[in-house]
Image: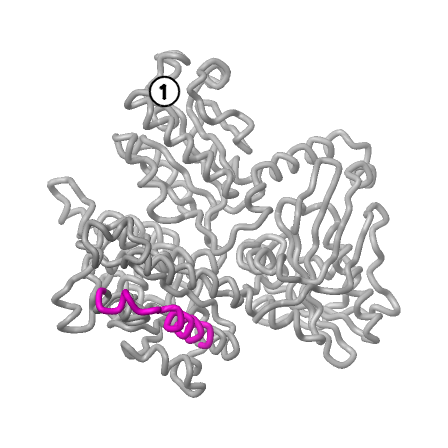
Amino acid sequence: MTNLSRPDAADSESELRARATAALEGADTLSAVQVARELLLAAPTIRSARALRVALAAQRARHPGLKPIRVALVSSFSSEFLHDHLVAWGLGSGLDVDIYQAGFGLFRQEILDAASGLYRYQPDVVVVAVEGEDWFPPAYRDFLRNMDRDSKAEVEGWQNEVVTLLRTLRNRTTATVLIHNLASPAYGALGAADAKHSDGQYAAVRRLNDVLVSVASEVTDVHLVDYAGLVNRHGALNWYDARMRHYARAPIAGPMQSFLAAEYVKFLRALRGLAKKCLVVDLDNTLWGGVVGEDGPLGVQLGATYPGSAFAEFQQYLLGLRARGVILAIASKNNPGDVDEIFAANKAMVLAPQHFAAIEVHWRSKSESVASIATRLGIGLEHVVFVDDNPAECEEVRRNLPAVTVVCLPPQPERFIDVLAREGLFDTVTLSVEDRRRGDLYRQRSQAENMRASAGSVEDYYRELRMQLSFAPVHQASLARAAQLTQKTNQFNVTTRRSTESDISRRARDPGWIVTTIAVRDRFGDHGIVGVLMAKHTGDVVEIDTLLLSCRVIGRTIETAMLAHVCDCARARGATAVTGTVIPTARNDPARDLFARHGFAKMAEDVDGTTHWRLDPVQRGVPWPEWFERAVESAASELGD
């Protein structure tokens, strides 16, 4: 299936494949990622995917900047047909995907056998892809014959099997687990009556999916792939290939395999810290139809009738993204007065100035605006999505800021939401309280920065903030947030080691580990959990494995308090040394001098620039900054498997 509609579609697809191959051969990773994504959006075909996979395999050594991730596929069907698509979509997201393939139908054996290839492979992610008719046949095959039976015991037996398989996985691997929910059949067994029948086939599948939701909530680091929703979006009659299901146990139609692989990559992207954080939008012909400078604030297309209704609906969608934690910003070539007037005078506007963390309205280039926004917000360009209706503006940003993801909107405003939503660029595996409040948190950060400018001294600024720090062991309620921070924090992160929920849960239950979250409040509000500290106590040494801070609170000496806390813990445990490592990356420059400026002695430096540090916490521990009010919790809530 191709989305190209131009007469020269085949030539465009061929040209994009050639450009992607050239970028890979030229070791231009950012361009390779950019063009691979463009190709897959234009032509999500097996030909495109295979070309990208072959080209990447030949040039992998030239692209160490791609984030590696090991994925195991265990399924009830022939999922090897997904390989090309999975590698290709991974490349389009900045990932280097390596795949382990279990034999189809052997998912139970692979999971239950401790010596199976699955565990020898040591995956980062395990995808459990099982069709409903293979998981629970009574709800699919011969449903009418089975519907009058009491199926409660059968459902409980199936639930116990799913729990056993997932707990076995969790006990034998720290990999994140993705498990399909179940799609309903294209035609209900009771025909037209099925939809309203409480004992119908559709209702039976819904009950099974409720079981999966419950089970996934019980086992740490298990996430549901909304397979049913995916089938629904594309239509069951398009999704399945009945002939291939019988012939090769490959029920998913060829053109649909790309969409399933792309769905997996949404999770992989988030797990490797590549989910986008900030959406920068144009204004004219993006938030409203027309040009405000020409049509006036009340003359633009926005309101209850088409096309204005489509623009209003798009604004509502953006407001929903903000509620999910996406930072909104504006980059517009316009007169500031005209923009102020439409926000003030046009009652059809859904969005208001306070919904945007940064606004750039002037006549300079869009790339300058986007770069300025990223700098002001303290986020990397790789976490920014730029949206515009003008292809020339999109190309200008794409060329000058290749790390930015560019979404060029189509002429039809009713398609805007689909074009922006289909890639899941902002999708995360969890949604924390801090995520939902991110827009407000960045506004608090801006207020604090304004106060810094007027403070008499840095110390005065710290005191005027009236900061309260809370150190707490990771517990069930904070586990997802802690894992999320390790997966997406890049700037103030001394090792940039990514941890899954199961990694952190296992460490938190081990008395040899210190696993702590750091929350911050100040005079402007509650910032929530902004830091994670993990350290291992072995003999006389406490070794810092992870020390990270959200970019929102960099520059407040919270890192000093974290090191002081480590020293307190080390002394309490009788340790005589605290050690730490700095692994340099392209983004963590703010954290590289952490140990040096806190009195640690440099013990060694590796050829790749990794440095190793040591401090005696008894003789010269790190003192607590005096401007913090602090609280330290000593006991964690019970963590599950």
How many marks the image carries: the answer is 1
Q: Is residue 541 left or right of residue 396?
A: right
Judge by depth and name the residue closer to the eye, 195 or 419.
Answer: 195
Q: From the viewer's perspective, is 390 left or right of 429?
A: left
Q: Position of residue 455 (x, y in %)?
A: 78, 32
Q: Residue at x 21, y 59 (%)?
A: 189
Work out whether 252 lies above or below 8: below
Q: Nearer the viewer, residue 212 or 635?
A: 212
Circle 1 residues within 10 Å: few <14, some 14–19, many ≥20: some
Of helix, strand and loop, which mostly describes the magenta segment?
helix
Residue ID at (28%, 66%): 148
Residue in the picture at 25% in, 66% down: 140
Label 1 sits on a secondary structure element that is loop
Q: Is residue 454 above or below residue 638?
A: above
Which segment is the magenta one? Answer: 144-164
| Residue matched to label 1 | 303
The answer to which image quadrant residue 401 occupies is top left
> Seen in the image, is 561 located left or right of residue 116?
right
Q: Is residue 564 in view?
A: yes
Q: Amino acid at mark 1?
A: Gly
How far across and how far down the image is residue 289, in percent? 33, 22
Residue 122: x and y in percent read 45, 77
Q: Quadrant of the C terminus?
A: bottom right
Any part of residue 186 in sight: no
Q: Residue at x 24, y 60 (%)?
A: 257
- Residue 602 is inside the magenta segment: no
